[in-house]
Image: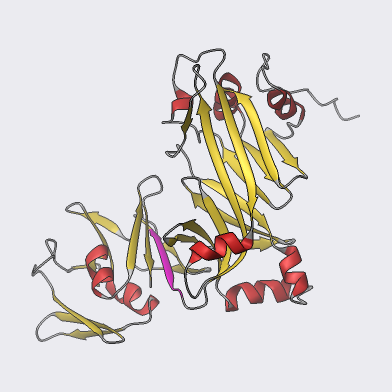
Amino acid sequence: PAPAPVETVVSETVNTAADTDANNSIQNNQATIVVETPTLFRTFSLEFMNNVNTTLESITLGNQTAQVTLPKGVLNNTAAAKENIAANENFTVEVATVPVAKAQQNAGQGITVISAVQVNLNVVNEDGTSSRISELGAPVSLQLNVGEYFQNLGLTTDAQRQAYIRENNVMVAFITPSGAQNYYPVTYSNGVVTANGITHFSTYAVVEAKNVRVVRMTIDKLNTNINNDTRIVDVPPMIIENRTMVPLRFIGEAIGGNVEWVDATRTVKVTTGDKTVSLIIGQTGAGLDVPAQIVDSRTLVPVRYISEQLGAKVNWTELTRTVEIIK
């Protein structure tokens, strides 16, 4: 007969009801607390969450609309990872469904919000004040339920829904009062889209961004994403003289541009719409302190310079060493 399962707990000492709920939900070295109300709000003892941070592979928290999965190590480099933990300090997690209309107001033109959620993590100090956690020690994932949205569109099979995601450029976006700032590719399964690599908490939305081109590349990695499609590049992005250098032809064509090479003058020219940028290999210029250069037969250029010259926006995430180009 199979051996009886061994009971596992994160911490022998539990100080809050959420601590107990998490201990009781542990399976396969993971804990899960999902509520049926629009808002999950749980208060854990800081000691317990530090044990979660170092013991469990992950803990998933949320409601029926959205869940956030915190992997091991996510609280490193935050106030919750300090050595001297006061017994009465707590850690709060909030996952709240945001009305679509409210998220749509901030999303910006050309973007349709499907579903939105607000995620907040705070350390509650001994004096009752709260400190919001913004710097994470590991990227997290968000899972958002969009099954009802697809059902209302008459899309009943996974094949139909996955095709819709590709055709309408469905992604998860970080929404701020000034608009969508970051975009994350998604995977889809059983009515749920999942976005990985998120490094800070706030409002996130599942959006249709038909006219947005997003290129995500990681330093020294050949795998990259154009919207939800995974591509392999010949030469990965790399740091040269403290600048992030990327393969020019790949970036130019990914954001809808045309790239030309003039061998006689060793000049590369990129054109998108009414914008044209010409760079000479090995030469700097105004705003260009690191020149274009040839690496393994590919032209590498500073990503921020070339992107902004072509009217694109660049985001850099230090934790994951990821550069995002949005056009």
Q: Pinpoint residue 144: horizontal percent, then vertical percent.
A: 65, 56
- Residue for point 50% across, 36% down: 74
Q: Give the range drawn in magenta.
A: 212-217
Above or below — where is 279 with respect to 2? below
Q: In this view, does 107 lie to the left or right of 28?
A: left
Q: Is residue 5 left or right of residue 117?
A: right
Residue 214 in the magenta stretch? The answer is yes
Q: In this view, does 266 lie to the left or right of 184?
A: left
Front in this rendered view, residue 21 or 179: 179
- Residue for point 55% across, 40% down: 120
Q: Pinpoint residue 185: horizontal percent, then vertical percent.
A: 53, 63
Is residue 33 in view?
yes
Q: Quadrant of residue 313?
A: bottom left
Q: Say which quadrant the N terminus sits in.
A: top right
Above or below — where is 81 with respect to 39? above
Is residue 299 in view?
no
Front in this rendered view, residue 102 or 219: 102
Q: In this view, does 161 lie to the left or right of 107?
A: right
- Residue for point 42% across, 38% down: 135
Secondary structure mostly seen in the magenta stretch: strand
Above or below — where is 214 with respect to 182? below
Residue 26 in the magenta stretch? The answer is no
Q: Say which quadrant the C terminus sits in.
A: bottom left
Give the mark count.
Answer: 0
